[in-house]
Image (cartoon, rainbow, N blue to C red):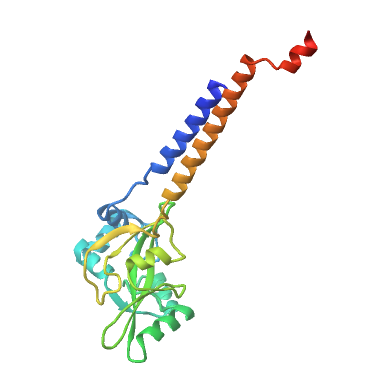
Amino acid sequence: MTRVGRLGTVVVLLAALAGCGAQQHRPTTGELMSRYFRSTHVRHDLYAGATSADRLAQFAAEGGPEAIVASMFSVYECIDADYLEQQREEERYRTYAGACPTADAQRRAERFAGRDGTVYTRRILIEHHDGSLDLGTVYVPKRRHGGTELVDRDGGEYRSLDDFRQHNATLHGDDWIVTLQQITSVPGHGRIVTVTGHTAPDRRPWLYAGIALALLVLAGAALLVVRAVRRRRTPDPLLERWSA
């Protein structure tokens, strides 16, 4: 392998290592909430406005940012999906209550809550990897004498926010969500946090394997170069005999 070839291999290796170490921009809760307050394109949101100014005026009429945030991250009993959509279209009903669960989610939630329990809805603000905003809905079944869990729209059950991030099949590692750290709390308490929608896999084993493979390639190439040099310096006796 020539010097240029070896240099190219090293450059590729370094570029790969730099890419593995790069980190995505981590938005703050304030940044995402500010985007939410001003954006006129938030999926599943009742507070629609033709302009950012209209939207901010609506929020001001509801009590301002603090009141909106408190309302947004609380829990509500669910509302029939068709009725909720009708009220949204007519701009008659503004609430952060979500639509009732799908059949699978309803079954899982009611199984946990029991006959005397209650199934609540909770909203989470999602910034998808393409930059779009969405008000997602999850469900918090609560037993009559205490005890809660989290159920998503697909019927997945989770004990905590970390459990949801590790195992949900809906969100990705480059999505961001704003929600309560105690996401299963009723009516809602604890810090509001911004975290990735899915826990990123540990890339260190792949990184170490890549480094080891690259070193093996470089070592093999160096060995070939050494052998080639030795052949040039040590003539083959058989060739000398026939050339005499």
**Toward the viewer: 173 or 129?**
173
Where, by quadrant of the figure, is residue 191 drawn? bottom left
**Toward the viewer: 23 or 6?**
6
The image position of residue 179, as x and y in percent, is: 30, 64
Q: Quadrant of the C terminus?
A: top right
Q: Residue at x 31, y 54 (%)?
A: 35
**Toward the viewer: 105 or 1?**
1
Q: Quadrant of the N terminus?
A: top right
Q: Residue at x 34, y 55 (%)?
A: 39
- Please give left or right for residue 17 compared with residue 224 in the image: left
Q: Residue at x 29, y 82 (%)?
A: 147
- Please give left or right for residue 9 compared with residue 132 in the image: right
User: Considering only vertical position in the picture, is 200 above or below 80?
Assistant: above
User: Considering only vertical position in the picture, is 41 above or below 92?
Assistant: above
The image position of residue 171, as x and y in percent, is: 43, 61
Q: Is residue 167 visible?
A: yes
The mark tally for this picture is: 0
Q: Is residue 62 visible?
A: no
Q: Residue furthest top?
A: 244
**Toward the viewer: 183 or 29?**
183
